[in-house]
Amino acid sequence: MSAPVATLPVSADAAASSSASTANKALIIGFVGLAVTALGLFVDDTHHVALSYLVGITYWTAIAIGMLMLVMIHHIVDAGWSTVIRRQFEHGLSAFKWLFILFLPLAATAFIGGGDTVWPWMNPAHVLHGHGTVETDILYQKKAAFLNVPMFVGATLLFFAIWTGLSARLRKASFAQDADGSVGWTGMNRQTAALGIPLGALSLSFAAIYWVKSLEYHWFSTMYGVWFFANCIRAALACGVFIMVWLTARGDYRGVLNKNHWHCIGTLGHAFVIFWAYVTFSQYFLIWNANVPEETFWYNLREVMHDGTPSQWKYVGLFILFGHFFIPFLYLLSFRRKSTAKGLFPISVWIVGVILVDLCYNILPALKDGNGDPLPFFSLNLLWVGASVVGVGGVCVWAYLRSLADSGAKLIPIRDPRIKESLTYHE
């Protein structure tokens, strides 16, 4: 290692004041973003602003879910290398309870303004372009047992209960082990992960279906939950890089990380670039090959207008294809780039940006004009998307920093059974 273990700044106490100050700044930025989003309700269509806010909520929830899944995967496979970075993901899990609170205004739209402010199927009288109303739509009638307000609200409560409950157990055991060093806490987290991984997989899949896919409920896709999972993991890994770079620059992680840790993060990120491409291509190819109208329309809406002219969303889709796969795939082929903070940081910025565009591609075309065409990508909606991402993100960053400063946990889990292996990984 570059420094002896004894000199590692493994306590968060020395940096607590700085973290708390930064947390307050993040919270102020978050409130400003949320205030700008709320202002949009008075200057733009409520439906536009609400869907833009859904982008922000889904984006940051995906990051938190990715961190949760990575922590559980770490425990279930008994990983050694990731022990030194696991603690920062555990701090990130503190955002779930705040994400739940921030999601409540969206859930409340089911009971106000006709119920279709966000999800059209919540209002039986909602007029579908060329399909009559929701109530008379045969496809909705077949899905009504799943797509109804009580099920939606109950499922959303269950999703956040699962994510928050799993996070609380994982954090409790990990932080407690710092105090007494009992290996029993490691066993507890493995048991939590064994139950939590299938629960997490099911809940994130159904959340993606309820929150995003049901915006255009006519559409069928068996790959949607896996697509969302891929984005969750990729976004979480990218944010992990940001955190590691920040803590290293601040001096907290001096002597902790070596080239092999960075290489593992970069290799895992590279693997999920390929995984995302496989899932996305499979979804597109199966729908294109089957050529069933109930499936192909979703892509047709994002490629051509009603008069046959190309839609702006067609070029957004091409950007996602190259930005999500070809650029990061080719970039991360280099051992040097994926083995240093300097190499991983820029591609991580790129990845989180493209993931945001990908979510816009899945959500915002639900906003349509009188001809049934999606509203252009470059419109006022991007302002509300930006404000929502900043607003929700500010709260999430604040939650992470407050946990870092106030939890009393060490910067790394110093009494984890595999901490020595992690600190000396491949050395």
Image (cartoon, grey):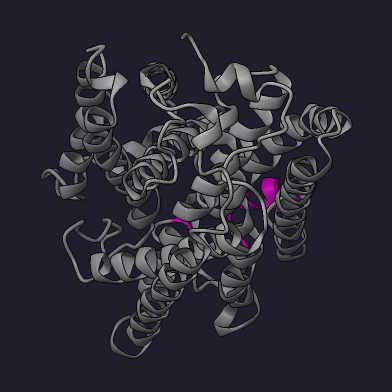
Q: On the rendered image, what quadrant is the N terminus found in?
A: top left
Which residue lies at the image location 62% right of the left edge and 20% below the top edge?
Answer: 420
Viewer-proximal residue, 20 or 54?
Answer: 20
Give the quarter of the image for residue 52.
Answer: bottom left
Q: Which residues are magenta?
A: 131-145
Could you say where residue 324 lies in the image, as x and y percent from the top left?
A: 28, 30
Judged from this view, the residue extending furthest toward the left is: 309
Q: Is residue 281 above or below residue 304?
A: above
Viewer-proximal residue, 90 or 234?
Answer: 90
**Magenta span includes 266:** no
Judged from this view, the residue extending furthest toward the right is: 184
**Magenta span includes 139:** yes
Viewer-proximal residue, 131 or 330?
Answer: 330
Give the quarter of the image for residue 184.
Answer: top right
Q: Is residue 138 above or below residue 281?
A: below
Q: Is residue 189 left or right of residue 336?
A: right
Which residue lies at the image location 78% right of the left edge and 51% below the top edge?
Answer: 165
Q: How many labels, in total? A: 0
Q: Residue 157, can we see it?
A: yes
Q: Residue 270, can we see it?
A: no
Give the quarter of the image for residue 276.
Answer: top left
Q: Is residue 150 left or right of residue 42?
A: right
Could you say where residue 335 lies in the image, as x and y percent from the top left?
A: 26, 11
Could you say where residue 140 lies in the image, as x and y percent from the top left?
A: 62, 52
Could you say where residue 80 lies in the image, as x and y percent from the top left?
A: 61, 18
Viewer-proximal residue, 411 or 106?
Answer: 411
Judged from this view, the residue extending furthest toward the top is: 426
Which residue lies at the image location 43% right of the left edge and 73% below the top edge?
Answer: 21
Which residue lies at the image location 43% right of the left edge and 18% below the top edge?
Answer: 264
